[in-house]
Amino acid sequence: MVRVTHWLTFIAFIALLVTGGEIVISHPRFYWGEVGNVNTKPLFVIPIPSSRDTVPTGYNYVMPDQNGWSRSLHFEAAWVAVLTGLVYGIYGLFSGHFKKDLIAKRRDWTWRAYRDRTAKYLRRAPPGEAEEISYNVLQRTAYVLVIFVLFPLIIWTGLAMSPSFTAAFPATVELLGGRQSARTIHFFVSWLLLLFLFVHVAMVALSGFRKRMRAMITGYTRDREESQ
Amino acid sequence: MNPITRRRLIYGSAAAVAGVAGLAAADRLAKRYGLIPPDSSGIYGPGETLTYACQRLLTTRTPAREFPRSMISKNPFANALYAQPLGDDFRKMQDRGFKDWRLVVDGTVAHPMSFSLADLKSLGLHSQITEVACEEGWSYIAEWIGTPLSAVLREAEVLPQTQYVVYRTIEEGAWESIDIRDASDPHTLLTMGMNDGDLPVPFGGPLRLRVPRQLGYKSLKYINRITATDNIRKFGRGLGGVDPEYGYSWYAGM
């Protein structure tokens, strides 16, 4: 179940990333507060051409408009991610997966444990016996942050941009400081998730790409010959 | 891996049968309660349908967000920098102060009629301070003054089988539609004024349909015809608007 939901989330995340990028191109300016447009001062501007001729970018070039399919795919992929997350959340709660695999054990929840494990990574020491089948404290912290902080935050900030959802639940956007603040936070959280993806894939590669991939797809943690 | 045991097979088949039956029941219920949008076909259909169905179940009766007067944007953006010229007929009407502007109301109504701007104003003016949010990401807040679409539909006596309201503009090929629930919302406003003045032409004057619980592309400018219907498939390619034909969602409440 963890593996199936992992790969579904991966597909949805890539779709969300690509289409989200396309949507940003139609207005590569970010603001803080409730409102913002080309007549107001931006918080920051991404120095890329836009797919709209109404946005002053400094480029004498308008990118092709890809927002139609991008938006439709963005929301459909968001549904896949949210429904998958729901299944994973219910499974994780009732199967003990969260408690057993993700929440750091109390005795590991110390600066010392973090420091020791970081030092071990820096020495590129091989993982211990326990780490072959479970996660260490740094991994647990990263996964908990992504699963319980970043994913909920990106869903929340996404919904806070929906005019009819915020009509029903105005506090969801007011707590964030307004519609444009929600959009800006949504943008930064997607970068944090992308950063996680890079580190995650790099760690998989460093620990033996083929071996880890096999584990992530089939669930086997050791070579078949070894386990026999 | 775990072998396929008889018990697993039975549980699996039972789950599959229950899933198919559940989907069929959900489909029937969704059709009955009007939870299927016109653009429910194609690869993005499931996403569009889930969004629309959830919004209809959760947010149909909640009014649009309104803002204090102090939050009205000082520099609203008309999004009309490079818009198509509106043509000579429009300029002639503009020169006469839009006295001959007509809004035709037809379709599934007991009394097809035509309204001048003065006729619309006589139905009662309402004002709201709401945000225009564009699908591109930008937004502004303004005060909008006009006549609720619901008042016009009441005047023409919209028939009970009506499911959608199609609206068209003086711009060739521009049309959109909303369901009867959004059309009946008091915030869905045939707008003639903005921030205590007449609605400026770049912002859609003399007549713009504001649909504040959906993105800006549903708030068409220069409205001249409204058609109530019980069959949205008859219009264009049957997707409920020109934006869905370009791949944009018909339901833009997100």
Image (cartoon, coloured by chain):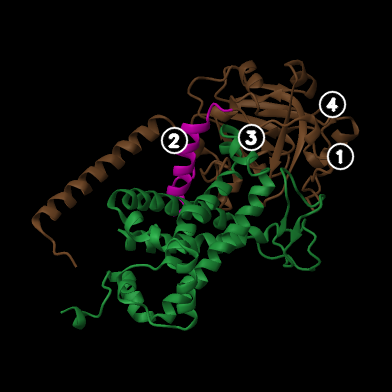
Question: Residue shown at 75%/48% (left/top)?
Answer: A36
Query: Mark 1 = which residue?
Result: B91
Which disc, if any, is residue B167?
Answer: 3
Question: Residue shown at 78%/24% (left/top)?
Answer: B117
Do tags 4 and 2 sit on the same chain? Answer: yes
Q: On the picture, is B63 further left or further right than A53?
A: left
Q: Colour of chain B?
A: brown
Mark 4 Cα shell of 10 Å, populated few (<14), some (14-19), many (≥20):
few
Q: On the picture, is B21 further left or further right than B192?
A: left
Residue B55 shown in magenta = yes
- Spatial CA distance of label 3 from label 4 is 21 Å
Please state which amino acid type lies under the numbered disc 3.
Tyr
Please state which amino acid type lies under the numbered disc 2.
Leu
- The boundaries of the magenta stretch are B36-62
In terms of sequence position, does the residue under pointer 1 or pointer 3 come before the other?
1
- Spatial CA distance of label 1 from label 3 is 22 Å
Q: Quadrant of residue A136?
A: bottom left
In terms of sequence position, does the residue under pointer 4 or pointer 1 come before the other?
1
- Residue A120 in the image, given as x and y percentages of width and height: 45, 78
- Spatial CA distance of label 4 from label 2 is 40 Å
- Spatial CA distance of label 1 from label 2 is 42 Å
Is residue B42 at all visible to an observer of this figure? no
Camera-nearest label, 3 or 2: 2
Which disc, if any, is residue B35?
Answer: 2
Identify the element where label 3 is drawn. strand
Question: Residue shown at 74%/44% (left/top)?
Answer: A35
In terms of sequence position, does the residue under pointer 3 or pointer 2 come before the other?
2
Query: Mark 4 = which residue?
Result: B99
